[in-house]
């Protein structure tokens, strides 16, 4: 199970994630992306959106292992 989040401070509102995965991402009233339904998209689709976000604002986390946080520009690994 993969969770996804958007770092609001990084998002520049390009809307690319909304175009790629509209079932998961929407822009709010401030033109910042929000996650409306993470389970509506495949992991591959979420990874594609994260990799194509121009601001590196989309982060995926594998809830099964709690060891990976991938995507975005600030990739952190707390395990091996
Ligand atoms: S692709 Fe990235 S910068 Fe663009 S709206 Fe989505 S989260 Fe924000």
Image (tube, rainbow, N blue to C red):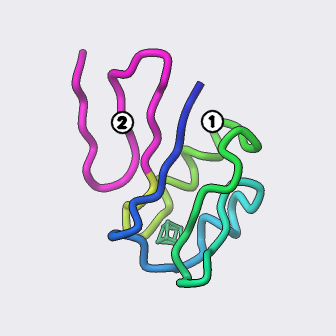
Q: Quadrant of residue 34?
A: bottom right
Identify the residue at image location x=70%, y=57%: 21
Decide: few, some or many residues near mark 2? Use Cα within 10 Å; few <14, some 14-19, many ≥20: some
Find the magenta span and give its range.
Answer: 59-80
Residue 49 x, y percent position in the rendering: 57, 55
Identify the residue at image location x=56%, y=31%: 2
* Quadrant of image for the N terminus: top right
Left or right: 2 as drawn, with respect to 80: right
Residue 35 x, y percent position in the rendering: 61, 56
Measure the C-alpha gap from mark 1 to mark 2: 13 Å
Residue 71 x, y percent position in the rendering: 40, 47
Q: In the rendered image of this protein, does residue 63 appear above or below residue 31?
A: above
Identify the residue at image location x=54%, y=44%: 47
Q: In the rendered image of this protein, does residue 3 appear above or below residue 19?
A: above
The residue closer to the viewer here, 19 or 1, is 1
Identify the residue at image location x=47%, y=58%: 6
Decide: few, some or many residues near mark 1? Use Cα within 10 Å; few <14, some 14-19, many ≥20: some
Q: Which residue is mark 2?
A: 69
* Quadrant of image for the C terminus: top left
The kind of secondary structure element at disc 1 is: helix
Left or right: 75 as drawn, with respect to 51: left
Q: Is residue 68 magenta?
A: yes
The kind of secondary structure element at disc 2 is: strand
- Seen from this angle, which residue lies furthest bottom? 30
Dot 1 or dot 2, earlier in sequence: 1
Query: For disc 2, does the CB lie below 8 Å from ligand 1?
Result: no
Contact (Cβ within 8 Å) of mark 1 with mark 2: no
Residue 63 x, y percent position in the rendering: 48, 24
Left or right: 29 as drawn, with respect to 69: right
Q: Which mark is residue 71?
A: none
Q: Quadrant of residue 79?
A: top left
Q: Which residue is mark 1?
A: 43
């Amino acid at each position: 199970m993969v969770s996804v989040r958007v770092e609001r401070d990084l998002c520049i509102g390009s809307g690319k994630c909304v175009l790629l995965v509209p079932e998961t991402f929407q822009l709010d009233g401030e033109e910042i992306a929000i996650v409306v339904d993470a389970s509506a998209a495949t992991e591959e689709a979420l990874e594609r959106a994260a990799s194509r976000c121009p601001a590196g604002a989309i982060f995926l986390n594998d809830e099964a292992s709690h060891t990976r946080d991938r995507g975005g520009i600030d990739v952190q690994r707390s395990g091996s």
